[in-house]
Amino acid sequence: MAISALAPLFVGDFSHYREVLVLTDDPRPAIAARSLLTPDGLEQVLARYAPNRPEADRRALTSQWSRAYFLRLIVPTVAASLILNRELPVELARLSVVLDDEGEPAAFKVPHEGSLWSRPPVDPFERFDTLLAGNFAPLIDAMSCHVRVSRKVLWSNAANYFEWLISAMARFRVPEPMLRDGRDLIDSPHRPDGSRNPMFQPVRYVERETGPSPLRQRRQCCIRYLLPELDLCENCPHIDNPPKGVKVAGH
């Protein structure tokens, strides 16, 4: 069942996210998100994601799968927080993941509709703590441990979609005060405890003489090119100097 409190978010270009965050009575089968923290659980998901590619680079597969996971979860969760001031129960331990026919995350089941903040969060790290510390951090740590994929790659995947969403919301004329915590999150090099903020400035905008300019370019490659059937992304940091034998998407 879709979450009625979030309905105002899913209009126009975002209408297809209406069934992404759902309640537990949604009839689609799902896996417990916490199973992704185990080697067996993660391997079962990767096997379903790439059933005909048993020899494929597991790091690249994990990175690609994580991109779908982060995109689908970030859009409704972050939009609900910034526009509706609503905190959603998206901790990994409380979430179930609906996989589509390709083995990618299609939806997430949550135990309830969340609640309004009783007071304004003191900073973006408090606002997004449930998503970042309660979901992304343990998932990224587990993927890095079990598959040996770089944490920087995975955090960059998440931060890339976060920055894209904030920019898209600005283009759709969401008032800047609503976007402040989102912008502050990706503009803060450190967390309140002084540690490095892994969501800090995941992209840069590069002026170029040829091709799209400015180019929205990731600072960290997602390593999808390690899968032979995939080219470099159009916003890859290697776009002007591709690894030997690798092509750029669209070229």
Image: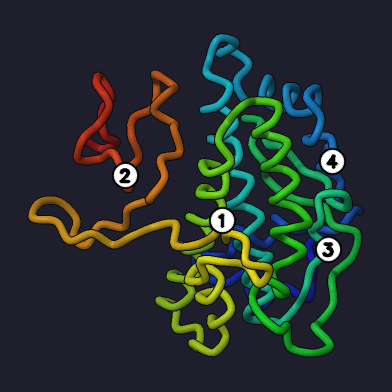
Q: Is residue 215 left or right of residue 58?
A: left
Q: Which residue is mark 1?
A: 198
Q: Which residue is mark 2?
A: 237
- Which badge, 3 or 1, is on the more N-terminal residue? 3
Disc tally is 4
What distance separates the C-alpha of mark 2 from that of mark 3? 34 Å
Badge nearest the viewer, 1 or 2: 1
Q: Quadrant of the N terminus?
A: bottom right
Is residue 59 shown above or below 19?
above
Mark 2 surroundings: few (<14), some (14-19) or many (≥20) residues within 10 A? some
Instruction: Estimate the x, y position of residue 39 in percent, counting from the top left.
Output: 78, 24
What distance separates the C-alpha of mark 1 from that of mark 2? 18 Å
Q: Which residue is mark 4?
A: 34
- Which badge, 4 or 2, is on the more N-terminal residue? 4
The picture quadrant where one finds residue 34 is top right
Residue displayed at 10% across by 51% down: 210
